[in-house]
Image (spheres, coloured by chain):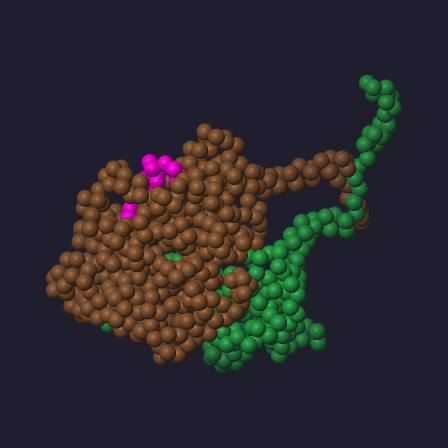
Amino acid sequence: MDDALGMAQDSSGPPARSRRFSLSDRQVGILFMLPFIITAAAFMVWPVIEAVRMAFYAYNPLRPDDIHWVGLENFERIFDDPLFWESFHQALIWTGWSIFFQTVLGVGLAMLLNMTLPGMAVFRGLLLFPYIVPTVVIALNWRWIFNSEIGIVNHALLQLGIIDQNIAWLSTPDMAMASAILLNVWKYTPFVIICVLARLQTIPTELYDAAKVDGAHSWRRFIDITLPMLKEVLVVVIVFRTIWTFNKFEEIYLLTRGGPGTSTFNLAVYAFEEGMANLRLGVAAATGVVMIALLLVGTVIYVRVSGFGREEKSA
Amino acid sequence: MNDSTRIPASRRQLLQGAALATTALAAPAYAQNAPRVARVWGEPGPYGGVFVQGMNEWAQRNNENIRFEVEQIPWDGVTVKLTTDLAARRPPALISVESPIAYQLAAEGLLEPVEDVNRAIRAQERLVDGFTLEQFGAWRGVQYAIPVHHQPCLLVVQKDVIDELGLGDPATWNWDQFANAARTIAERKPGMAGYTMALGRNLCADYHISQLIWQAGGMTWDASAGFRTTFDSPGTLEAFEMIRRLQPSMPRAAVEFSFLQVVDQHATGRTGMSAYWGRTMGRAAEEAPALFNNMEYYLNPAHPRTGARWSWTDINGWIIPRRDNAFIRETKEAVAHVSNSVDWMVRYSHSLMPNVGPVFKDVADAPAMLAHPFYQSKKRSLDVIFKESVPHACNTGLEMKRGVNPLAGVAHGRSVWAQSVQRMLLNNESPKTAVEWGHRQFEGIRRDNARMLGG
């Protein structure tokens, strides 16, 4: 049968003029992954490669035509800089205490949320609030809340008689670091809670019942049942939180700008200052490379020491 | 198992869809780079916007294909913004920044010469007495800045507090009387600091600290002697000791203060005196009439030995990026149009009184300028801000008016002056140790940027 234009029609299949695109399942899968691959390559892989490359060049952003090879000079500069070591030391304090409190509070609150108590559903909903509010909003609000002259924290503490003089939360080196750690813990403990709570809810209750029958008290049940069951998820959470916290820039910079003085500098803030204030982007990139190396080594060591995945492999 | 999937579309349809999607995604980027909009960087405050309105008046009359738009850049965010935009080869068409940064950019070869504009607006003959064209932004005999305003940093006091405590006339104070006044206010007025200045690691603290150094006869570099680093000097040491002497009279949080915190402190009645520019008076007029009524500006207290009253003054001019700037000609013409208009320049100064001092005589003396209410209620202070401060005006890029120095812009990026003082106040280093540390940093900056100095 011919159509209106006199073209021959094959009534048993698709029109002869158009060719249908035929893909295998594998190809369709790749097609779906393509946007992510392109985005990851453009915004994650390429910047890292470029940063590593830049670590070996001198680059003043005001003179973009004057980029030249300097070899390991950038690395020598940062290793000779007392501020780098001071920032590294402060980064360890910042990361260590943040992770410690996030883990302890996260596990504790997750166990509380795992209980069927009145109001828990509401609290679970409010739980995510610190995690979803943008860091800029939190940090700028905290600057006001912790203002030593007009901040509500000092006002409340004075009214309650807990202090008799305003605390300089952000104006002394120790208190500024403590305030920054407090902000970090407040914001990211919900992440730990969510991960731990999900794992807690898969622990068979029969284990606890059997332990109770055997006379184990609550602390014993926590140590011998809960903690081993949480081990795998805690390894993952601690590794990721450590990496993210060690690299953190915005909380510190927005809250204290690395001050007072340089007392809350971590390596991310140090890299920013080298690049933007000192106009040495190569040195900033070198700092980033050092951070990558430190985190890589630290992660490998931690995962091996913790025995992550060892039980499953032996099984 | 079926291992193939039929997509109900032809190859041509798929390609057409991909092309549409790409165009849609690229549209914002294309729109942003459309050549119609010329960006103008101004300081925080409405005056940049007023000037740009005048520039757009020129555009409407002469070139409807262009539109000027103002972007406000925070004072201590300029360096970061500049480095990223210049490195991305997307500079604004026109910039108003703190003088030391303008000098630095000029020495880096990043600015367009503007002698043609300054001739067109007769800048040299119109400048108020006490300023020279070179002070706004000349480097190696070439003019790179078009004068637009000046802002001196002076002593701001609540006169009622001074009178109540019998502290005399701030106009006659020297450092000792000033320190005594600060201490007396802090002791006898609960909840009120005696004096507030910025001591955080930022641009504002750099400015406040350096004016004390000059008053004591010190300098960071000597531009008249080959830019030799002279920070480690008796004058600098005296200034550091003065800051340590004043600190007990300051708010405890002063070590984190930048520009706006100092204004906040004064405009909310929590300090009897402060170091600041005109904005504090403007803010008090808007929000605290009682404070405004008793607020007065004075020249900085004289150093007892040198008698100097130097004030860190933003001798501000418009600068034009030279590279990757598609709007140089239009920008020059538009700036000339506004600068030649007494009406627009009065509006510019009036937009944030008394923060933005007029730099042209015909503007400063214009009846419209003098009609502002502050000239009735605060004439004495306005005379100090706009006229009496001029002989004492300098800045870190023009120390004690001994020559333009581009190194200051680099040093401000690191807030070296503020860092030096913080080492004394926070790390409990002796003033001498802190000054020596600062000297090493400044010498390092000089060495690293010798190429910029032509050395």
Percent across and percent down for residue A308 are: 63, 74
* Visible residue check, residue B18: yes
Asked which quadrant contains residue A233, the reply is bottom right
Left or right: B283, with B410 as reference point: left
* Residue A40 part of the magenta-drawn span: no
Q: Magenta part mainly helix, strand or loop?
A: helix
At x 76%, y 35%, the residue is B12
Percent across and percent down for residue B304 are: 24, 70
At x 50%, y 71%, the residue is B444
Q: Nearer the viewer, residue B372 or A126?
A: B372
Q: Which chain: brown?
A: B
Percent across and percent down for residue A96 are: 50, 74
At x 77%, y 41%, the residue is B6
Please state the extent of the stretch shown in magenta in the rendering. Answer: B338-355
Looking at the image, is B280 positioned above or below residue B24? below
Looking at the image, is B437 positioned above or below residue B57? below
For chain A, give the colour. Answer: green
Left or right: B294, with A251 as reference point: left
At x 86%, y 19%, the residue is A6
* Residue B348 part of the magenta-drawn span: yes
Percent across and percent down for residue B231 are: 40, 71
